[in-house]
Image (cartoon, rainbow, N blue to C red):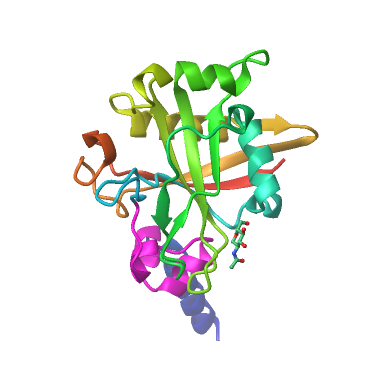
Amino acid sequence: MFLLTVHLLALGLAVVASPVQQVLSASPSNDQDQGWIDPRLNGGRFLDYTSRRFGEPLNVIISAHSDPYIMTDAGLHDYAKSIGFSEECLGLHYGHIHRADLGDGDGRKPELYLARQYYFPIWGTCWESLAGGNHFRAWKQNGTEANSGAWFLGASKEEHSGKRHKIVPNGYNLGRDWLVAKAIAGGRWKDMAWQAEVEWREDLLDSGKKGVNHGIPQDGRVAVLTVSRQ
Ligand SMILES: *[C@@H]1O[C@H](CO)[C@@H](O)[C@H](O)[C@H]1NC(C)=O
């Protein structure tokens, strides 16, 4: 009996200790367990469709294991504000709407939200729109074929509008890292505070510039955030 217990304990430890990577690369249901589903399992990809040929990296995921409030539309907007983003200037939408295929059966669906870095109160996002800066687009993985509820974000840093919102050199990596740093540091909006944990994935998106909008290379790393209410 004692031996059996030891055996079961060892087995349990082995399961717990098995590398995360191995678990993640298994079946779609395992991916669902982690709060998002790999879009590639059902025809999607980690580049959006900026145009028919080119896309920008979906380089941040907000796992559905995060605070349920930020998985809602209103909650994402509040969360974005807590880490230094705001709504678009006066509701003006620069450039055109990007689409993304999250492998959830919805095909290439339009972004739901474009958030821009908020510089300071007087100018707000209007200032950012002129000056350039960090921004992200968001899509929700909630089609019937992969209804995880996760947010997929394309974060980047762009030049000022005089340059027609071109991404700065290294702008995809920089935009992602800026957002992730803010998320880890944590922020507050109204009476709510959040802090994120990050898991870096290097097996979802090819590094380089192939198919990437503006031909700007990116390092292929995707940050998976789990955001908790403090
Ligand atoms: C998916 O989420 C978006 C944003 O919350 C919502 O507008 C849309 O109706 C949802 N789709 C489904 C099938 O529930």
Vertical side of 125 occupied by 180: above or below: below
The magenta region covers 20-46
Vertical side of 25 occupied by 68: above or below: above
Q: Nearer the viewer, residue 163 or 24?
A: 163
Location of the C terminus by quadrant is top right
- Looking at the image, how many numbered discs can be counted on the residues? 0
Location of the N terminus by quadrant is bottom right
In this rendering, does residue 160 appear at all? Answer: no
Q: Nearer the viewer, residue 147 or 3?
A: 147
Identity of the residue furthest to the bottom in this view: 1
Name the spot of residue 41 as percent of width and height, x first: 35, 69
Please tell me which residue is depicted at 49% across the width and 61% down the height of the picture: 36
Is 212 on the left-hand or right-hand side of 106?
left
Q: Quadrant of residue 84?
A: top right
Is 156 on the left-hand or right-hand side of 92?
left
Name the spot of residue 190 as percent of width and height, x first: 78, 32
Q: Quadrant of residue 11?
A: bottom left
Is 132 on the left-hand or right-hand side of 77?
left
Q: Residue 25 in magenta?
A: yes
Please tell me which residue is depicted at 28% across the width and 39% down the height of the picture: 213
